[in-house]
Structures are given as structure tokens and as C-alpha cells.
Image (cartoon, rainbow, N blue to C red):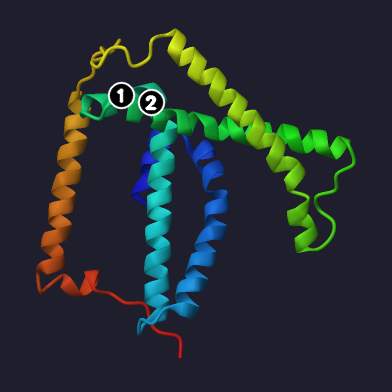
Amino acid sequence: LLSLVLVLLNRALKEWWGTLRMVFVLSAIIFLLNFFFSERGNKVNYASAMTLRFLTLTSFFSLFFLTTPPEELSDALVLLGIPYEYTFMFMMAMRFIPTLARDLQTIIDAQRSRGLELERGGIFKRVKRLIPLLVPLIVLEIRRSVVVAEALEARAFGASKRRTLTEEYGLRRAEYCFLAWTTILTVALIVLSRLPQTASIFGYRLPEIP
């Protein structure tokens, strides 16, 4: 619920919902797997808890990457003391995900125009038909990695151990207030969960299916 409030405040509901549509399918799978294969006593409560944890993590991560420019995230990691080489690898991996999806779709369209049928046949035939997709994709990405490496060498990447940033970052008053609010809320929830008067609310369990 808190992530939904933050999504509405950032006016990113449409983009956020687009990234989470497939997550609900995975959530249903997680619930069923935990319900049928868990050795816990209350399987309904345990499966629901695992599903809610997964939804919470994916929701906040989706909101984070929707509202945080990659350049600012890279600069923040450098300011935290992480070596720039690792930060660069992480950011390149993030940037290559949509590029990889776009290249795969281009290869699929090209192979379909040549008569490749991906939706027909059994599971083994479909897996076999993935070879004409994966081989060109791997070759294309290897070529792209060589181009990126040559571009980095042309720009003397790694010549300086210490890098400077083009922008200066600092926390604003609203961000300090938000940090204080989240800290107070977290401490209050921990204290309330330990008090005898309110511990039963935090220890609520869903009823077990007979």
C-alpha cells in the first residue's frame, strides 16, 4: 500500500502497472508452490506471507528504477565508495536489458518472415526452433560488446582511478523529512509489535483450510 501511495505521488501509475502485470502471474505461482510444497503448519498464512514479500520487493524496485535516472544511480554508487568499474558494469547490464529485448524481437520478426513457426508443435519442437533465434542473438551481442570495448578504450576508460562528477548531490529538506518519517514509522512498528496490548495484531495468522 505504501508503494502504491508513492507511485501516485510520482504520477507513474501507468508505467508502474505495466511493469507489474506479469509479476502477478509469478505471484500466483509462488503462492501455489509454497502452499502445496511447504512443510509449515499454516500453509495458507505462509504462502500468503511469501507472496506479499515478493510483491512488496518487486513493487518498490519497479518504482525505484522508474523514478531514478541511471546516471544519478551510477553517481550515487560512486559516492558510496564503490569502484567505478563495477558501477559501470552494473549500469551497462541494466541498459542492455531493453536493447537485448529489442534485438530479440527484431530477430524473431526476421525469422518469421523466412517461414519459421514458433507457436506450432510440441514442447521439444518449440525448444529446437529457438536455436535460430539464440545463435544470431548471441553473435549480435558479442559484436556489440566488442564495439563498446573499443569505444571505452578510445575514451581512455580506466586511465584515472579517481573520477569527478558533473553534478553535486545533496539531500533536500523534503528528503530529510521523509527519512525521519520512515525511521520513526519503523521504530514505532517494532515497538508496537513487542507490546502485549498490540502484539496480537502483528501476530495475526490467516485461518488454515481444513
The disc at residue 160 is none
Q: Which residue is mark 2?
A: 88
**Which residue is nearer to you in this view: 190 or 157?**
157
Q: Is residue 125 left or right of residue 2?
A: right
* Residue 146 visible in the shown view: yes
The percent coordinates of residue 152 (x first, y second) are 45, 15
As drawn, 203 above or below 114: below
Q: Is residue 39 left or right of residue 15?
A: left
Q: What amino acid type is highlighted by mark number 2? A: Phe
Q: Which residue is mark 1?
A: 84
Residue at the far bottom: name it: 210
- Marks 1 & 2, CB-CB < 8 Å contact: yes
Q: Under tag 2, what secondary structure?
A: helix
**Which residue is nearer to you in this view: 210 or 107?**
107
The percent coordinates of residue 161 (x first, y second) are 25, 17
Q: Quadrant of residue 192?
A: bottom left
**Which residue is nearer to you in this view: 140 or 190?**
140
Q: Using the numbered discs, state the Cα–Cα distance from disc 1 to disc 2 in whole angstroms.
A: 6 Å
The percent coordinates of residue 116 (x first, y second) are 85, 44
Q: Under tag 1, what secondary structure?
A: helix
As drawn, 182 above or below 89: below
Q: Quadrant of residue 71?
A: top left
Residue density around tag 1, few if under 14, some if 14–19, many if 20 or more, within 10 Å: some
Q: Quadrant of residue 43?
A: bottom left
